[in-house]
Image: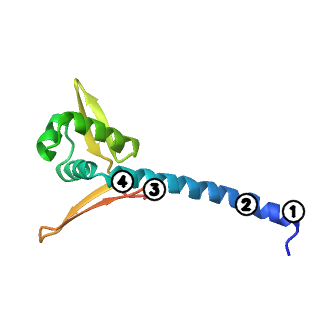
Amino acid sequence: MPSSSAKEALRRDASPWRARRDEQQRELETVLDAIRCPVRQRILLALAAGGRAHVGGLVGRTGVSQKTLSHHLGHLRTAGLVFGQRSGKCIWYEAAATRVRYQRSGDGQFSLTVAARGAGWR
């Protein structure tokens, strides 16, 4: 049976790992919450497949109203899946290349892959 000082040493050594695991769990929950919504899925697909766009362009691509798009883009930005860059009066939105990947195969099928932070895509 380990002594109390050995138990304390194990607990101290495990705490950074536990903190990292907890952080990763929160990140995963944030991403899953962001992509759970079908409207956000459409927005992500539109940006990943079609490239950057302003809200007006996304209205045309998704069929979602401007007000609804703005609301859901906020959630996607918070999750780090989308970012915006102001240019004059417009904000151009883009899927985060390190977090969202769109691939289309020759037979017309596609995949949309979303990664949590630290996935290391380039």
In terms of sequence position, does the residue under pointer 1 or pointer 4 come before the other? 1
In this rendering, does residue 117 appear at all? no
Q: CA distance from mark 4 to mark 3?
A: 12 Å
Helix, strand or loop at mark 1: helix
Asked whether 3 or 33 is in front, the reply is: 33
| Element marked by disc 3 | helix
- Residue type at tag 1: Ser
Horizontal relation, residue 54 to residue 116: left or right: left
Which of the image's four quarters has the N terminus? bottom right
Determine the image quadrant of residue 77. top left
Q: Which residue is mark 2?
A: 13
Q: Which residue is mark 1?
A: 5
Name the amino acid, label 2.
Answer: Asp
Disc 4 target residue: 99
Residue 3: where, in percent of width, then height? Answer: 88, 68
Give the image location of residue 11, x and y in percent: 75, 61
Query: Which residue position holds label 3?
Result: 28
